[in-house]
Image: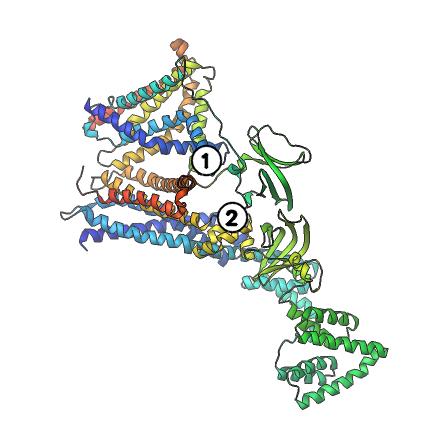
């Protein structure tokens, strides 16, 4: 590498970094000023948000920065003293500039396909956290004023998960705990045992023994029955089970006055346990919940009900869960098409901790099917579909009801919440998602380009930088400054006008590319006999021609002064 | 003479090169300003628009080609700055001749205005929710000329389904018992009817394309100023018709040339061509603002131009031509001092 080439590379890289840093600083201050005042309450998140926004903005202006850098270098910088040597040739600046342009193009394409979508997603997550924090703060204050202390604690917990340094919320938490302790409700909560889901015989046996020693025979019975499922030959367990049943038989007499009633209770419980063993949870739930309502004193029933409920929550939900989450910030007014041909409208969706809660859902069938509108109060995203319901508890659905009660969307709700925010969604999709999801998103009703159009548009962006950088550099070199240092006023006007001109020309090229994309339909009609050419190939050829012309023009320049 | 013919040739070539992109740009820009969606316009509509806008397209292309030629000209070959006006005037005269040749004969060449044809596909994409603010519209083809339209209103959360809907334009009115969507060109809106009841009205402005080269804030500001200036120029000359109007426009355009050519020449740095291009952009950007403010001053002069008799309407334009001549003299004198 000769000295001139080294200088050229230094100028280009330093120029690029300086322009990048200047753009970043400008956007950082601009975005800080633009930021909504309400989002500033959590400083660390607000800073992270501004940082991401400014990086995104800077990366989006990369094409214009690169074009401007090349015009500046070939118009002014490469005419300065370090390049005024005897061994200077045009090739010594053109070749490194060309290689660097290819590297910059790789950076631009990777930022547009991977980095910007990633940052946009992170930005959306931070935004959501800030919204939750803001909502939690005001809701916690409201609950505290109303004296609903238990709920206040759970809401503050959510806030503190996002920002654990907020002294106001920590104080509110401490005050709430004090109130609860004073009213002794916390003590009552302390007595309640956590539902048992452990399957080890030892654990259940030990818990059963403890409950038996505490004369809590119903709880003991529950644990012994669970333990017996796994260890039928354990003599000690059998004996304890027998004794517990004997103890319960006495108390059963007090609860069920008639022998017939007692017999029915035992039969029903056995049937429910059989359902539970066969993993027929809906049936088990129906029996246990009715028995629990009838005999609330029998703690084993309550524990069985908890076990069944825990299993059912994996495939179903209770309306209570959604009402509890109703205060959280939501996305409103979703409309989308699902796999069964329904047009679904959702009044609001609450995305929270990986869950998606849907409120007030209406479903209308698409043409060709029997027209009908079905309304639902609640919906929750469970295992690839949205389970809908109006009732409070769990209810097994008949096969014919399944289509009505489940929305099977083409895409996950994480994408559905961007209904009406097409541009935001598009900015979030990386290249892999664009390829794998474009068709599904389109079927959902999103106005999104197919893969061919996406590639063609990306090629337009890429070739815009390539063609404009080379063409304008060559033009700038042909009309370059011959001063040792250009006139200051003209240099000032140049720096003022040319970045805007480069940006405008880049936009013009991209729009021209869109025009070529539009003309593809005429081309396809004209050459329909040749089975039509893929739009990406068509655009690639057109841009390729421009690129060849620009490259030849760039390489044909010389160090001769006109 | 050689210099003149070479410069004329340069302007002519640049004019031919620029007329296509300038034509397309002005056509798209104007359509977007008129709230006509441009993303699915069709070549026929585009050609109609370009033809309707032929005068401004030719004018802008001519101005650009002249200024870029002057901005990149070799100053050593310019014998006189006054002479530099002539190539532009020659091309201008040729263009004017063509213009009058197609208009002022007894049997003029028919270049009459034609409206662009708009169908529902100019506004909507099929099978997807077209996002129009809080409203979303989905159009699905049901059978030949009948469609099912889903209209979702985000403000109320209501979904309206219009099945077996016919689509019409212009004068068609809603019929009882039939759903329809009517594109009302005169009212610049699209109306959806369920029977005779109007369920949604979408103004064309909802379809305006944003965030691209034809719609950015700097350009909007610029066009706004151009419009203001044109309105100010025409405010006292609304009574002008026929040859008087043409004369007025011609003299005004001449004044633009007379001011911008010396300025561009001044910005043309013999040792740095790109500064000339920078200069052209700055001059083009500043001229409407300059005209706007100067017009206020010129129009404020009472009795101005009464000595011109029936041509008194030319007074402001002639004042600008005068400013151009003064600029010529100033640059010439300054150049002589510097030895250029």
Task: Please report the residue visible at 35 percent of the width from the left and 50 percent of the height from the top.
Answer: A20
Q: Is residue A127 above or below residue B329?
A: below
Residue B169 is left or right of residue B63, and the answer is right
CA distance for labels 1 and 2: 25 Å
Foreground: disc 1 or disc 2: 1
Residue at the far left in the pictured view: A86
Residue A477 coordinates in the image, percent (x, y): 24, 41
Residue B121 coordinates in the image, percent (x, y): 52, 38
Task: Please report the residue visible at 21 percent of the width from the left and 53 percent of the height from the top.
Answer: A6
Element assignment for label 2: helix
Screen quadrant of the C terminus of chain A: top left
Residue annotated with mark 2: A422
Q: Can you tell which quarter of the image residue A129 is in?
A: bottom right
Residue B67 is left or right of residue A518, and the answer is left
Residue annotated with mark 1: B42
Q: Can you tell which quarter of the image residue A460 is in?
A: top left
* Front-most of residues B153 and B16: B16
Residue B255 coordinates in the image, percent (x, y): 34, 21
Residue at the far front in the pictured view: A529
Screen quadrant of the N terminus of chain A: bottom left
Residue A349 is left or right of residue A11, and the answer is right
Task: Please report the residue visible at 47 percent of the width from the left and 40 percent of the height from the top.
Answer: B210
Residue B315 coordinates in the image, percent (x, y): 39, 15
Q: Chain of mark 1?
A: B
Circle 2 crowding by C-alpha within 10 Å: few under 14, some 14–19, many from 20: some
Q: Is residue B95 above or below residue A147?
A: above
Q: Chain of mark 2?
A: A
């Amino acid at each position: 590498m000769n000295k001139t080439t080294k200088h050229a590379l230094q100028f280009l890289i330093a120029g690029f970094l300086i322009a990048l840093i200047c753009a970043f600083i400008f956007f950082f201050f601009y975005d800080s000023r633009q930021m909504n005042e309400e989002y500033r309450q959590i400083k660390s998140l607000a800073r992270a948000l501004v940082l991401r926004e400014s990086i995104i903005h800077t990366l989006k202006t990369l094409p214009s920065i690169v074009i401007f850098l090349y015009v500046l270098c070939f118009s002014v910088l490469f005419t300065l003293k370090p390049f005024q040597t005897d061994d200077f040739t045009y090739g010594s600046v053109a070749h490194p500039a060309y290689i660097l342009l290819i590297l910059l193009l790789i950076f631009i394409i990777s930022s547009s396909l991977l980095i910007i979508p990633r940052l946009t997603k992170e930005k959306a997550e931070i935004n959501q956290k800030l919204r939750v924090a803001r909502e939690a703060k005001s809701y916690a204050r409201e609950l505290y004023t109303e004296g609903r202390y238990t709920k206040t604690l759970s809401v503050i917990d959510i806030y503190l998960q996002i920002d654990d340094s907020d002294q106001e919320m920590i104080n509110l938490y401490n005050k709430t705990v004090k109130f609860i302790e004073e009213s002794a409700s916390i003590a009552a909560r302390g007595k309640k045992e956590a539902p048992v889901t452990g399957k080890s015989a030892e654990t259940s046996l030990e818990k059963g023994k403890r409950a038996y020693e505490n004369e809590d025979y119903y709880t003991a019975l529950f644990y012994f029955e669970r333990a017996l499922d796994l260890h039928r030959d354990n003599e000690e367990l059998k004996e304890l089970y027998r004794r517990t049943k004997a103890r319960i038989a006495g108390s059963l007499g007090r609860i069920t006055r008639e022998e017939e009633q007692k017999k029915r209770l035992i039969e029903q419980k056995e049937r429910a346990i059989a359902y539970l063993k066969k993993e027929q949870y809906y049936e088990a739930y129906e029996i246990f919940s009715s028995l629990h309502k009838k005999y609330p004193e029998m703690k084993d029933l309550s524990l069985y009900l908890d076990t069944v409920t825990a299993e059912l929550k994996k495939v179903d939900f209770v309306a209570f869960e959604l009402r509890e989450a109703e205060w959280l910030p939501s996305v409103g007014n979703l409309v989308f098409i699902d796999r069964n041909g329904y047009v679904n409208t959702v009044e609001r969706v609450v995305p929270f901790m990986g869950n998606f809660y849907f409120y007030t859902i209406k479903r209308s069938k698409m043409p060709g099917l029997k027209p009908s509108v079905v309304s639902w109060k609640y919906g929750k995203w469970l295992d690839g579909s949205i389970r809908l319901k109006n009732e409070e508890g769990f209810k097994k659905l008949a096969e014919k009801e399944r289509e009505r009660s489940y929305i099977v969307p083409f895409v996950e709700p994480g994408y559905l919440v961007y209904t009406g925010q097409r541009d935001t969604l598009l900015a979030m999709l990386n290249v892999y998602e664009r390829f794998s999801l474009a068709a599904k998103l389109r079927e959902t009703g999103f106005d999104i380009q197919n893969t061919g159009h996406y590639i063609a548009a990306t090629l337009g962006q890429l070739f815009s930088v390539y063609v404009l950088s080379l063409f304008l550099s060559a033009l700038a070199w042909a009309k370059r400054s011959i001063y040792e240092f250009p006139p200051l006023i003209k240099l000032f006007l140049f720096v003022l006008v040319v970045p805007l001109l480069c940006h405008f020309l880049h936009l013009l090229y991209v729009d021209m590319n869109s025009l070529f994309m539009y003309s593809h339909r005429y081309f396809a009609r004209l050459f329909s006999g040749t089975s039509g050419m893929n739009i990406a190939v068509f655009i690639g050829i057109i841009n390729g021609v421009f690129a060849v012309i620009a490259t030849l023009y760039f390489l044909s320049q010389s160090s001769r002064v006109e | 003479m050689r210099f003149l013919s070479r410069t004329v040739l340069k302007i002519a070539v640049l004019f031919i090169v620029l007329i296509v992109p300038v034509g397309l740009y002005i056509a798209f820009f104007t359509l977007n300003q008129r709230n006509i969606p441009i993303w699915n316009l069709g070549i026929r509509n585009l050609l109609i628009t370009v033809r309707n806008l032929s005068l401004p397209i030719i004018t802008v292309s001519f101005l650009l080609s002249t200024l870029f030629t002057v901005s990149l000209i070799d100053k050593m070959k310019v014998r006189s700055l006054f002479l530099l006006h002539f190539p532009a005037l020659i091309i201008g005269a040729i263009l004017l001749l063509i213009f009058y040749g197609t208009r002022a004969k007894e049997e003029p060449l028919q270049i009459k205005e034609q409206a662009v044809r708009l169908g529902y596909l100019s506004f909507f994409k099929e099978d997807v929710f077209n996002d129009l603010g809080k409203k979303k519209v989905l159009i699905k083809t049901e059978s030949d000329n009948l469609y099912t339209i889903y209209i979702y209103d985000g403000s109320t959360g209501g979904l309206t389904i219009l099945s077996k809907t016919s689509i019409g334009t212009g004068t068609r009115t809603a019929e009882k018992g039939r759903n329809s969507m009517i594109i009302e060109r005169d009212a610049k809106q699209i109306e959806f009817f369920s029977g005779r009841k109007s369920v949604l009205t979408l103004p064309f402005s909802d379809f305006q394309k944003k965030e691209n080269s034809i719609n950015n804030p700097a350009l909007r500001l610029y066009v706004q100023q151009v419009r203001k200036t044109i309105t100010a120029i025409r405010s006292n000359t609304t009574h002008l018709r026929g040859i008087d109007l043409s004369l007025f426009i011609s003299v005004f355009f001449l004044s633009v040339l007379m001011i911008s050519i010396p300025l561009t020449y001044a910005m043309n740095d013999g040792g740095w061509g790109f500064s000339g291009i920078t200069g052209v952009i700055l001059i083009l950007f500043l001229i409407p603002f300059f005209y706007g403010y100067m017009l206020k001053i010129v129009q404020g002069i009472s009795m101005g131009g009464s000595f011109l008799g029936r041509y008194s309407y030319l007074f402001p334009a002639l004042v600008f031509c005068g400013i151009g001549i003064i600029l010529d003299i100033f640059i010439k004198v300054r150049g002589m001092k510097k030895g250029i």
